[in-house]
Amino acid sequence: MLDLYGGHCVNTLGAGHPAVLAAIQEQWNTLSFATNFFEHPARERFLAAFDRIVPPGEWRVFLSNSGSEANENALKAAL
C-alpha cells in the first residue's frame, strides 16, 4: 500500500522502506533543523544543485521554511 496523502502533519515518505528510514535517521543525526539565518553545508549543497538547473540569467533566491512563508514573501516581493 502506498499512502500519498500529504495533508497537515503528514510526511509522504512511503510505507516505511528501510532505505528511506535510514536516510531520515542519518539526516536527523547530522542536522535535524536548519534555519535560513545561517549558512550550513546542506544549504550550500542545495544551492549548488539548484544553480545547475536554473536557466541562465541573473537570479535571486529566497529559501523559506514553509509554503506559507514562501507565499507571504512572494506577495511582498510582487508589490
Image (cartoon, rainbow, N blue to C red):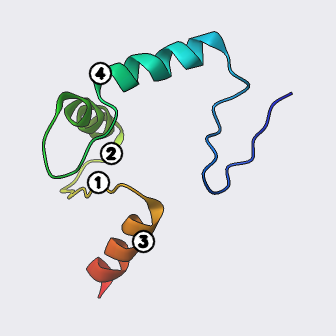
Instruction: Compare marks 4 and 2 and give the one earlier in the sequence.
Output: 4
Label number found at residue 30: 4
Residue at point 36%, 80% (across, down): 75
- Residue 20 rendering spot, x and y as whole percentages: 57, 19
Q: Nearer the viewer, mark 3 or mark 4?
A: 4
**Residue nearest the viewer, comparing 51 with 3:** 3
Q: Amino acid at mark 4?
A: Thr
In terms of sequence position, does the residue under pointer 2 or pointer 3 come before the other? 2
Q: Amino acid at mark 2?
A: Val
**Residue at (16, 34) in percent of width and height:** 40
How far across and how far down the image is residue 46, in percent?
A: 30, 35
Q: Mark 2 to mark 3: distance in Å? A: 20 Å
Q: Label 3 vs label 1: CA separation?
A: 11 Å
Query: Which residue is label 1 attached to?
Result: 63
Query: What amino acid is found at the position of numbered circle 3 in the picture?
Result: Asn
Q: Secondary structure at mark 1?
A: loop
Secondary element at tag 2:
loop
Q: Nearer the viewer, residue 47 or 26?
A: 26
Label 1 CA crowd tier, 10 Å (few <14, some 14–19, many 20+): few
Instruction: Give yes or no for contact between labels 4 and 2 (Cβ–Cβ under 8 Å).
Output: no
Q: Amino acid at mark 1?
A: Leu
Relative to 38, is 15 above or below?
Answer: above
Per the model, the C-alpha gap separating discs 1 and 2 is 15 Å
The mark that comes first in sequence, 4 or 1, is: 4
Name the image quarter holding residue 34. top left
Q: Determine whether 5 is above or below 74 in the image.
A: above
On the image, numbered disc 2 is attached to which residue? 54
- Quadrant in the rendering for residue 79: bottom left
| Cα distance between the residues tagged 3 and 4 | 29 Å
Residue picked out by circle 3: 71
Residue lying furthest bottom in this view? 79
